């Protein structure tokens, strides 16, 4: 007698959500396919595929996570594969989740630190998705600081006789001992000195990044986060110390994202930024969360996603509120201006620049400015003006502001000076000053050759693309000869 195939149970959870979302079977399949394409997946599902899912068939691979993300976007609340009656799998959006609480936030970000050990070529394969910006920024805007951050000492094991005995060492404790006493095992009591050390390390890596590019010491930063910061986050601390610890962890995680962005590992950088945003929320540091969103906005500008860049900057402004220091307000408005500049929106860009300028002018010497915002001064504002006017093809204004920024900018900001010099070279080219443009660009190209920064190289390549109409001119041939020598 032939055995009949087992009957599958109809997926009523999925059916209910399809009805709530107003999807047809074909419409759901199409959206899953489109989302798959954002991640380089050629899925080719159709209405028959959805019919099979409704009958109880389980889709394979990352598809359950993709289906859950489609419903998350449509319904405006986070849904998992299990919520849809589907088997769990490793999410295709790993690292873009906005954690439900502090413990989950630590799990997600520490997972990123441990996995971030590949070559630059491998890291660049992690997909960036503009759609992945929407849910985290919304969750941050409407969310509140977590009520409880403190972590108590691990409980003691109580034997049958009623006498407490020490908790037996677990695998993580033994692994920590094998790695050496310099690393902290979970249960370490976090002190003010530990947090001061995190901040000092952050200053060191920021200085290296500014001077030599994100690729110079990025892996050392990530390993420090894995071996020093994670054990602290899994240690013990009170409420106040815990929030300071999460604030320091947010800064270092944002910096890991920033250095990843600088080497063109954009998908990885995006994930670090989302997790830095979540850590800042645990810390209850609203202004710093707004700064993380500004960082995400700058990445969106660089990748040509102007509309998303504007939206992120506006969410940052709304979330920071009107009580943020003037310097922070200026930073937020300048980020919005950059998004409008990429979109060619002259009036909106100009208005945002004016707001940034007025905010910075209203700052007073005695104002308390967060340490992470102190870089935003007259030199930085002039740089923002220069970039915006370049994008709007207002080359005379771009040249004036770029020159002012270079006059004011400290030498330690070598990469920023390089970017500004390339803005000036592009402006000179737009004004027909070919000799001067090529001279400036050659200086910047020499600096880029000494840095580990894909962005620096891309600024040079962008200028060279603009040189194509003049490729037979003598200054251009001289420029190319000089750049070839740097290679």
Image: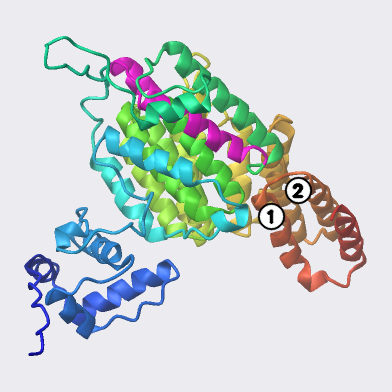
Answer yes or no: is residue 400 visible. Answer: no
Secondary structure found at label 1: helix
Frontmost residue, 256 versus 171: 171
Q: Using the numbered discs, state the Cα–Cα distance from disc 1 to disc 2 in whole angstroms.
A: 9 Å
Frontmost residue, 120 versus 167: 167
Image point 47% across, 12% down: which residue?
A: 193
Question: Is residue 54 placed above or below 296 in the rendered structure?
Answer: below
Question: Is residue 476 placed above or below 442 in the rendered structure?
Answer: below
Q: Is residue 244 inside the magenta stretch?
A: yes
Q: Which mark is residue 348?
A: none
34 vs 300, left or right, is left
300 vs 240, left or right, is right
| Magenta stretch in the rendered image | 216-245
Q: Mark 1 near mark 2, Cβ–Cβ under 8 Å?
A: yes
Looking at the picture, how far across and down is residue 63, in whole percent? 30, 68
172 vs 5, left or right, is right
Q: Residues within 10 Å of mark 2 (few under 14, many from 20)?
A: many
Looking at the picture, how far across and down is residue 238, in whole percent? 29, 15
Q: Is residue 282 inside the magenta stretch?
A: no
Question: Can you say which quadrant of the picture contains the C terminus?
Answer: bottom right
Image point 54% across, 42% down: which residue?
A: 258
- Number of marks in picture: 2
Frontmost residue, 450 versus 81: 81
Looking at the picture, how far across and down is residue 32, in whole percent? 29, 72
Per the image, the residue denoted by label 2 is 448
Q: Which mark is residue 459?
A: 1
Type of secondary structure dominating the magenta stretch:
helix
Q: Nearer the viewer, mark 1 or mark 2?
A: 2
- Which of the 4 image quarters holds residue 210? top right
């Amino acid at each position: 007698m032939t055995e009949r195939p087992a009957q599958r149970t109809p997926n009523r959870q999925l059916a209910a959500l399809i009805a709530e979302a107003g999807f047809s079977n074909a419409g759901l399949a199409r959206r899953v396919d489109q989302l798959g394409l954002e991640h380089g997946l050629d899925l080719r599902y159709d209405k028959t595929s959805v019919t099979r899912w409704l009958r109880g068939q389980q889709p394979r691979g990352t598809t359950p996570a993709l289906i859950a993300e489609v419903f998350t976007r449509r319904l405006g609340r986070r849904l998992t594969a299990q919520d849809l009656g589907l088997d769990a799998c490793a999410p295709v959006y790993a690292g873009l989740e906005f954690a439900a609480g502090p413990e989950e936030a630590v799990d997600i970000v520490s997972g990123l630190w441990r996995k971030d050990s590949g070559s630059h070529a491998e890291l660049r394969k992690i997909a960036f998705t503009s759609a992945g910006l929407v849910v985290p920024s919304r969750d941050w805007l409407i969310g509140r600081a977590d009520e409880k951050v403190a972590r108590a000492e691990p409980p003691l094991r109580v034997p049958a006789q009623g006498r407490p005995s020490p908790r037996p060492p677990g695998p993580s404790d033994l692994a920590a001992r094998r790695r050496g006493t310099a690393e902290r095992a979970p249960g370490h009591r976090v002190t003010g000195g530990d947090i001061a050390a995190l901040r000092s390390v952050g200053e060191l890596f920021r200085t290296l990044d500014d001077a030599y590019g994100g690729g110079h010491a990025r892996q050392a930063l990530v390993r420090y986060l894995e071996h020093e910061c994670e054990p602290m986050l899994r240690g013990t601390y009170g409420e106040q110390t815990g929030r300071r610890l999460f604030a320091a962890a947010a800064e270092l995680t944002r910096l890991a994202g920033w250095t990843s962005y600088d080497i063109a590992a954009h998908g990885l950088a995006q994930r670090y930024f989302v997790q830095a945003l979540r850590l800042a929320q645990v810390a209850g540091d609203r202004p710093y969360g707004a700064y993380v969103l500004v960082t995400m906005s700058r990445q969106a500008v660089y990748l040509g996603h102007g509309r998303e860049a504007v939206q992120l900057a506006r969410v940052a402004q709304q979330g920071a509120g009107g009580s943020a220091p003037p310097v922070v307000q200026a930073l937020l408005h300048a980020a919005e201006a950059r998004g409008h500049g990429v979109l060619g929106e002259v009036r909106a860009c100009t208005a945002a620049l004016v707001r940034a300028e007025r905010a910075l002018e209203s700052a007073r010497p005695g104002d308390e400015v967060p340490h992470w915002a102190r870089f935003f001064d007259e030199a930085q504002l002039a740089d923002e003006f220069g970039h915006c006017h370049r994008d709007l093809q207002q080359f005379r204004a771009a040249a004036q502001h770029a020159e002012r920024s270079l006059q004011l900018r400290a030498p330690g900001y070598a990469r920023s000076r390089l970017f500004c010099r390339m803005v000036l070279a592009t402006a000179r080219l737009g004004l027909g000053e070919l000799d001067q443009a090529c001279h400036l660009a050659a200086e910047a190209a020499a600096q880029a050759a000494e840095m580990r920064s894909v962005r620096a190289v891309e600024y040079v390549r962008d200028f060279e693309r603009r040189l194509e109409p003049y490729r037979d001119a003598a200054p251009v041939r001289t420029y190319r000869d000089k750049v070839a020598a740097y290679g």
